Image: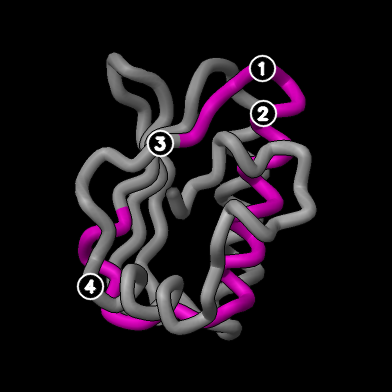
Amino acid sequence: MADIELLDSPDGLVLVARGDLTIGDARLFKERLMEAFDGSGPLNLELDKVDEVDLSCIQLLCSANRSYLSRGRGISFTKPLSGQIRTFVRDCALDPAVCGSQCRDQCLWK
């Protein structure tokens, strides 16, 4: 189970996730992303302490990125992604070059 917090910082909101970020955590993860979307400014993600991730939460991040970009806001990572996330994204072959999204040039997985 993930520990997911939304924190204020001088650089905007920071969404911090620790532990497993999987389908069982998707609802809470989505709620925190929506809370952040209601704010202003960029969203900074701190996911370096994520132990496991699955496609449900990766899809939520892709959707959040499109939503933020549609409002002229950005999402960025505060620290390098955990090895688990990097491996999962690579194994899923998530590649902005073949993505059908209009925001592929600002893909989180570049």
- Looking at numbered disc 1 in the image, what kind of residue is underneath it? Gly
Q: Residue at x 49, y 35 (%)?
A: 75
Q: Could you tell me which quadrant the N terminus lies in?
A: bottom left
Secondary structure state at the residue bearing disc 3: strand
Residue contact between numbered discs 2 and 4, judged by CB atoms under 8 Å: no
Residue wearing tag 3: 76
Q: Could you say which disc has been placed on residue 83 in the image?
A: 4
Q: Secondary structure at mark 2?
A: helix
Q: State which region is magenta.
A: 47-75
Q: Position of residue 13 (x, y in %)?
A: 42, 29
Q: Amino acid at mark 3?
A: Ser
| Residue 13's disc number | none
Amino acid at dot 4: Gly
First in residue order: circle 3 vs circle 4: 3
Q: Residues within 10 Å of mark 1 (few under 14, many from 20)?
A: few
Q: Which residue is mark 1?
A: 72
Distance from label 2 to label 4 (Cα)? 26 Å
Q: Label 3, label 1: how many angstroms apart (C-alpha)?
A: 13 Å
